[in-house]
Image: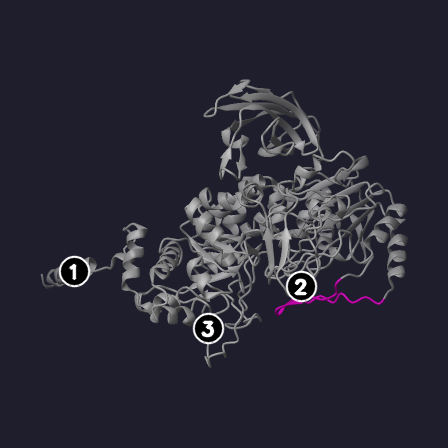
């Protein structure tokens, strides 16, 4: 009886306590009510504290209210190792290794939304396990020039492809209670002068080419964070740009997440206050200008902002709006008690990395069916090239990773073929022998005493007696190659690789060139080499994935997400002279005179030149036959749609995947338009002899262009062509309808 009384007393005591749970801590309440309640409880100083960094990668929470700090992490294709509080150097943790996933060019090359969802979910789990609230990615800046050192972090040249692929990635990441921070908003299309390039671009080009992926990220993906870019637009830095952030992002698109500055992207307190920036990270201050002990207190949105408020120079309306966005982020991430726990370096994550890599590798050329390799017992395989052994996860800027493991191409080939064949390695050339970035080291000794001539001679001597020769080269993530902060200086391969490839081609007709890069490269030897693979930077499982494709265990199905030009002079950004590549301390105006004619849009208009490899190109070990496309009606009303269908058949002798592409062209319009624009794609898997019907719905949105005078999307009545294609230069059929 006494025990009953005790329990009854506890129940009575608990009742008022439960009733006193503040609204902001009550997860049953709508998030906006929680935000307003938390905001009302914060002091001025607490509000200012949450909108700027307190360390390299974190911002302060509100300890008094139980609101945790916000921790961010670099994550173009893996979760960055922990760094010191105030420095870029390693913190010395032993449990901060990660899985390196393929870079986003490879993901885009899968043309598979399921792979994007798997990617986002997997990398989001790793971020969550490391207790990160914000993953600083994905990147969706458009591939305007093949010299851009950061292209490997992005999703190619086409706005529709990038917009489609970014949405499931975001959804996968955020299913873990981790915010995807889509970057770099906007017009960050090269790295030279990235801090001081003022981009001049017309509104039509802006809306049709450079904004669609960001818009999809916000409106379809529901992104919780956006990162501003370094460059200027309309003479304002993009991290506090009135037109981009206030007018477009929040005004037109209704974005309710946080805008985060890129590290060092904030330059002015007044603009940061009024032009849409919410969280300031990485600003350059020595912390000494006012005798402060903490540099973070001198950030533009720190003490300078607080002083302006206290003096009455500015009010608190803008501050409250910023804090609301930060609180909304906190409630979606670190204060969501039901978010999953995540996982790190799991078998499932390695399997995902391998699957995405295998599906993104592109078979560019395969004369005489050199691939897949038909290796008999006792065969001899020669592997040549520095990229066969060099770690590709260290370096490249913010993409540099501390991986638990990275299987090199040579290791993968030996693992796959070593039981039945002799696998021999020759260096062939010497590239970058370094192996350190911000304290992350490869541990590799890539020193070489042989001359360039001797390296080639040794490789050729081995090639003459080999059953297969596999050259694995390309670029790396060193400065002025595929690397943040710098651009390439040429389209050609570095380190004299062209000479090595030509010598090998002359020595052995069964030569496979595997190009590892995040960019297009010139291939002056393309006619001399029977088989070429584009293998990207594909992370921890690189060696396994490459061996999977070489062996035929995986039938390649990747398609190029950007055009491979034959020479740099075929790229419109360079034709018109609006890319300088010359570093300058002054603000540099770069006008995008290529306008909407980026990539295949430009190539389609040329009569005398053709790409080396077209956008959407990619071969298979099987063959696919397209039937004649059909359309369900010849006329369409403005509020209607048409359905275009085509039968695709696997006419080869092995299972394979084909990406059917749908482009739309406007025969006559009041403004110039491209010949065709990608408006749909579907990847199908077919057994030998199997057929399937692929159908695309075309509605008004697929027919529009942006009218800068009206500032709206316009679809003009008239005839439209719908192209069914295997690549931008490989149209398999066309149907026509009229918009009434």
Circle 3 SS class: helix
Q: State the residue at coordinates (68%, 57%).
A: 487
Question: Toward the viewer: 591 or 18?
Answer: 591
- Residue 623 sits in which quadrant? top right
How many other residues sit within 10 Å of disc 2, few (<14), some (14-19) or many (≥20)? Answer: few
Q: CA distance from mark 1 to mark 2?
A: 66 Å
The circle drawn on residue 298 is 3
Task: Establish if 118 lies above or below 449.
Answer: above
Rendered position, 195 above or below 257: below
Q: Which range of residues does the magenta coloring cover?
A: 432-449
Q: Is residue 597 magenta?
A: no
Q: Is residue 560 left or right of residue 40?
A: right
Q: SS for tag 1?
A: helix
* Residue to which mark 1 is pinned: 16
Q: Which residue is mark 2?
A: 584
Say which label, 1 or 2, has the lower sequence index: 1
């Amino acid at each position: 009886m006494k025990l009953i009384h005790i329990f009854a007393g506890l129940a009575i005591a608990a009742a008022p306590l439960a009733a006193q749970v503040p609204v902001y801590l009550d997860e049953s309440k709508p998030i906006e009510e929680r935000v307003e309640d938390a905001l009302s409880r914060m002091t001025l100083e607490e509000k200012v504290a949450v909108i700027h960094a307190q360390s390299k990668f974190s911002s302060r929470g509100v300890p008094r209210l139980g609101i945790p700090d916000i921790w961010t992490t670099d994550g173009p294709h893996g979760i960055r190792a922990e760094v010191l509080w105030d420095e870029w150097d390693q913190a010395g943790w032993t449990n901060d290794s990660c899985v390196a996933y393929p870079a986003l060019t490879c993901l885009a090359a899968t043309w598979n939304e399921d792979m994007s969802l798997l990617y986002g979910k997997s990398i989001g789990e790793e971020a969550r396990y490391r207790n990160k609230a914000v993953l600083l990615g994905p990147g969706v800046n458009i591939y305007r020039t093949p010299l851009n050192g950061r292209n490997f972090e992005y999703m190619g040249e086409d706005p529709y492809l990038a917009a489609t692929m970014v949405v499931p990635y975001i959804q996968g990441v955020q299913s873990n209670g981790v915010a995807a921070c889509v970057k770099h908003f906007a017009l960050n299309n090269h790295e030279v002068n990235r801090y001081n390039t003022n981009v001049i671009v017309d509104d039509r080009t802006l809306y049709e080419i450079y904004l669609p992926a960001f818009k999809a990220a916000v409106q379809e993906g529901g992104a919780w964070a956006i990162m501003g870019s370094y460059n200027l637009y309309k003479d304002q830095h993009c991290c506090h740009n009135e037109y981009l952030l206030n007018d477009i992002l929040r005004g037109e698109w209704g974005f309710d997440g946080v805008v985060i500055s890129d590290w060092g992207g904030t330059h002015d307190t007044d603009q940061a206050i009024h032009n849409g920036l919410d969280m300031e990270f990485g600003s350059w201050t020595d912390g000494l200008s006012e005798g402060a002990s903490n540099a973070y207190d001198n950030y533009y949105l720190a003490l300078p902002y607080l002083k302006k408020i206290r003096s009455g120079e500015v009010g608190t309306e803008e501050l409250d709006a910023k804090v609301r966005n930060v609180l909304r982020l906190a409630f979606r991430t670190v204060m969501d008690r039901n978010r999953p726990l995540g996982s790190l370096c799991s078998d499932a994550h390695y399997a995902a990395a391998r699957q995405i890599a295998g599906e993104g590798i592109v078979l560019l050329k395969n004369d005489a069916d050199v691939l897949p390799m038909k290796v008999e017992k006792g065969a001899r395989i020669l592997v040549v090239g520095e990229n066969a052994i060099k770690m590709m996860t260290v370096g490249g800027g913010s993409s540099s990773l501390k991986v638990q493991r990275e299987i090199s191409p040579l290791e993968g080939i030996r693992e796959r073929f070593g039981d039945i064949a002799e696998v021999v390695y020759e260096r062939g050339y010497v590239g970058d022998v370094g192996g350190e970035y911000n304290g992350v080291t490869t541990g590799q000794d890539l020193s070489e005493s042989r001359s360039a001539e001797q390296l080639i001679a040794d490789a050729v001597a081995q090639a003459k007696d080999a059953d297969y020769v596999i050259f694995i080269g390309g670029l790396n993530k060193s400065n002025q190659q595929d690397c943040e902060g710098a651009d390439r200086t040429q389209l050609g391969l570095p380190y004299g690789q062209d000479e090595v490839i030509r010598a090998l081609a002359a020595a052995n007709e069964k030569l496979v060139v595997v190009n590892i890069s995040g960019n297009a490269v010139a291939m002056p030897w393309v006619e001399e080499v029977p088989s070429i693979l584009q293998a990207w930077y594909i992370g921890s499982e690189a060696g396994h994935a490459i061996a999977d494709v070489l062996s035929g265990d995986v039938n390649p199905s990747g398609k190029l997400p950007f055009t491979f030009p034959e020479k740099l002079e075929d790229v419109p950004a360079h034709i018109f002279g609006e890319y300088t590549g010359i570093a300058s301390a002054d603000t540099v105006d770069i006008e995008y005179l290529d306008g909407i004619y980026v990539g295949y849009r430009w190539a389609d208009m040329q009569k005398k030149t053709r790409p080396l490899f077209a956008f959407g190109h990619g071969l298979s070990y099987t063959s696919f036959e397209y039937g004649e496309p059909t359309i369900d009606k010849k006329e369409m009303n403005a509020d209607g749609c048409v359905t275009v269908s085509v039968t695709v058949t696997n006419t080869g002798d092995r299972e394979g995947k084909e990406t059917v592409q749908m482009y739309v062209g406007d025969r006559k319009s009041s403004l110039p338009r491209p010949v065709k624009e990608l408006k749909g794609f579907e990847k199908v898997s077919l057994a030998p002899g199997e057929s399937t019907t692929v159908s695309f719905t075309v509605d008004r949105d697929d027919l529009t262009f942006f009218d800068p005078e009206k500032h709206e999307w316009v679809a003009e009545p008239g005839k439209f062509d719908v192209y069914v294609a295997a690549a931008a230069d490989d149209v398999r059929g066309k149907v026509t309808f009229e918009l009434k």
